[in-house]
Amino acid sequence: MVRLKAPYVSGFLAFREVPFLVELVQRLQEKKPDFMPQVLLVDGNGVLHQRGFGVACHLGVLTDLPCIGVAKKLLQVDGLENNSLHKEKALKSHDHSTKPLYVSVGHRISLEVAVRLTHHCCRFRIPEPIRQADIRSREYIRRTLGHPGSQAQRQERSQKEQGPKACPKGSPGSPADQGRPPKDCDRGPSTDPKDPQPGFQEQPKAQQSEGTGHHEDSDLWPPPAWL
């Protein structure tokens, strides 16, 4: 746990958070060099930034590691507007996602590779490295501050970390079905006429806002067929 000293100023997030991230990478390199990452995914922007140099660029340059910026909201710069056109071009984590992600180059990686890598890291809407870092850091804060929550809440968080079981090969969730929702995974077909199409498992509202702490990450869906 760290104590942030710099205030939050829009467009200057790197000066508030990057020093601690760089320190973590350096400690990992010293103590566990075999676990050094090949690429970093950052909850923020790269070159898609008011000054063309977001938190992903800052962290990438200081660590000299390939870095990708993954944002949940569109930063309206360089003529980009939050309209229907951008939604057609934005990255969707899976076929049933209702909210896009905005991927931008941070350091030492092309946009094509950054988009493809981010897409393959998505079991849910948020790429798994960022999602797990958020879940586990919040759980650590709860334990440290002595607010572990109820047993039911801990079980929900544990289930959220594990995620749904993937369909076996050859099941209705296979690539041949072109990403249609699997009928036999997680639960059987529903007979409730108000229930969405079979295979869709809605998360309780408490669980949607639990874990990552982001209300945007509510369109959880079983892993896409291509994973």
Image: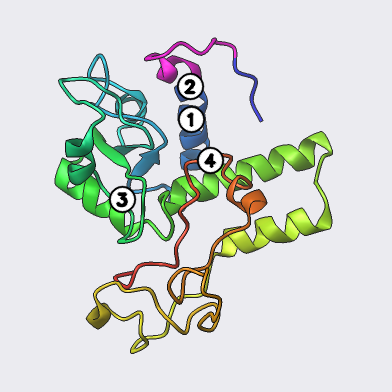
As drawn, 12 above or below 224: above
Which residue is under mark 3?
Answer: 118
Q: Quadrant of the N terminus?
A: top right
For residue 19, the mark is 2
Look at label 4 and name its amino acid. His
Which residue is under mark 1?
Answer: 21
Q: Residue at x 28, y 29 (%)?
A: 46
Q: Earlier in the sequence, mark 3 or mark 4?
A: 3
Q: Nearer the viewer, mark 1 or mark 4?
A: 4
Callout 1: helix, strand or loop? helix
Q: Which residues are magenta?
A: 5-16
Q: Earlier in the sequence, mark 4 or mark 2?
A: 2
Q: Earlier in the sequence, mark 3 or mark 2?
A: 2
Please state if 151 lies on the left or on the right of 74 as rendered: right
Please state if 147 lies on the left or on the right of 190 as rendered: right
Question: Residue 19 location in percent, x, y?
Answer: 48, 21
CB within 8 Å, label 1 to label 4: no
Which residue is under mark 4?
Answer: 215
Q: Residue at x 36, y 32 (%)?
A: 73
CB within 8 Å, label 1 to label 2: yes
Question: Disc 1 versus disc 2: distance between alpha carbons?
Answer: 6 Å
Look at label 2 and name its amino acid. Pro
Q: Nearer the viewer, residue 207 or 133?
A: 207
CB within 8 Å, label 3 to label 4: no
Question: Disc 1 versus disc 4: distance between alpha carbons?
Answer: 24 Å
Look at label 1 and name its amino acid. Leu
Question: Disc 3 versus disc 4: distance between alpha carbons?
Answer: 20 Å
